[in-house]
Image (cartoon, rainbow, N blue to C red):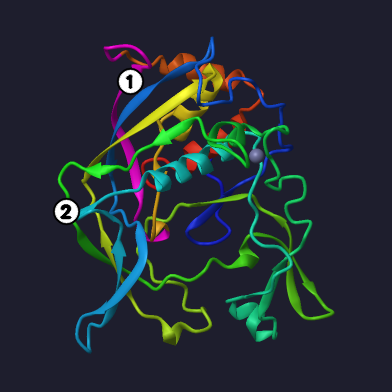
Amino acid sequence: MKPTSPAPGYAFIPLPERVDRQPRPAYAAHDRRHQGTHAGTLRLTWLAEQPIHVGTGFKRLVGDRNTRAILREHVRLGDVPCIPGSSLKGVLRARFEAVTHSCFDPPKRDVRVKTRSTTFNERGINHAVLTADAARGFERTCRSPGPLCPACALFGALNLRSRLVVTDARPAVPTLDSHTIPEQFAPNLHHAGRLRVRESDNVLEVQRLHGRKFAVGRDERPPPSNYAHVADQRPQRLEILPAGTHLHSELRYTNLTAAELGGLLAALGLAPRSRLKLGGGKCHGLGRLFLAAHTHRPRGKHDDEPLDLDGYAHAFARSPACHAANLARLVALHGEDC
Ligand SMILES: [Zn+2]
């Protein structure tokens, strides 16, 4: 069953019923090996199934008067375009959080943001605000040595380093191309949760968040014509790694339980199978990555050994950290056509 999307290009994976914070285990350390846990290196070959754009934040105007567009630059390592390890790790963390009973980093609360909506703008309601209660109980408050949620324990928290290292993904054949998408707007806050009009100051109150947001767009439709300042729109040209590009990176892990390794395999889209969406333009047919191949070498061994994908997936499924329904949702959202 595919979750419905309340806003084009996005779907929500609900927050879990509770955050499962546990006392920090002794193995949640990266400087020393612990008995009964797993360590090793995964060599990953990613396939860009759609163009990939990871922006540097730099942009410049290109084209003549009739074709003028803003070109947003893709990240390079030296001269070579790549996907930074930090970007990959960020996506893996977001996916791991979504399929576990983990804490959440909510958008800023009690801050008025502009709202683009004909329906509301016509009624003179131009701002939305997230109430302090919108993500109560899920705030990112994990910090070592206090209790930690599954994601913070594995990916790191205040005073706790991650047990994962993800290296930059470098293309087998470095090529850059460009791709044009409609101008992107900051996401509309009033799509993010349950709504009520606050009569006192005519502001939309977002009271309870729908959940964690995941991009699902693959179509090239222009943005809805009811955007208030549609006349200001300018197409944006992005530097991209073209679809079909293969990229290589490494993931090194230290002191993972079998359940954590299983959760990581789910985040990687390896077991069960799914796709990652990464970078800019995810709602416009960009950003889909597939883990096309991998090899695995346990720490201290001289030969590769296959990973027991089923065994680790089962260990994760049986662990209290796993949110089985949300794992099924993520796999349904990020299948072959996201
Ligand atoms: Zn946490």
Against 246, is 266 above or below?
A: above
Helix, strand or loop at mark 2: loop
Judge the density around disc 1: few (<14), some (14-19), many (≥20) Cα neighbours within 10 Å.
Answer: some
Against 170, is 296 above or below?
A: above
Of the numbered discs 1 and 2, the one sitting upstream in the chain is: 2
Judge the density around disc 2: few (<14), some (14-19), many (≥20) Cα neighbours within 10 Å.
Answer: few
Q: Could you tell me residue 22's position as x and y percent?
A: 71, 27
Q: Which quadrant of the render holds ligand 1?
A: top right
Say whether residue 286 is magenta: yes
In the image, 194: left or right of 282? right
Q: Nearer the viewer, residue 199 or 40?
A: 40
| Number of marks drawn | 2
Against 197, is 21 above or below?
A: above
Q: What's the residue at 28%, 15% (across, down)?
A: 304
Quarter of the figure that contains the N terminus: top right
Q: Could you tell me residue 104's position as x and y percent?
A: 64, 46
Range covered by the magenta-colored residues: 283-304
- The residue under label 2 is which amino acid type? Thr
Q: What's the residue at 47%, 59% (across, down)?
A: 9
In the image, 107: left or right of 186? right
In the image, 149: left or right of 235? right
Q: Could you tell me residue 155's position as x and y percent?
A: 54, 36
Q: Nearer the viewer, residue 207 or 222?
A: 207
In the image, 123: left or right of 290? right
Q: Which residue carries the number 2 mark?
A: 175
Query: Could one spot residue 277 in this view of the protein?
Result: no
Against 187, is 228 above or below?
A: below
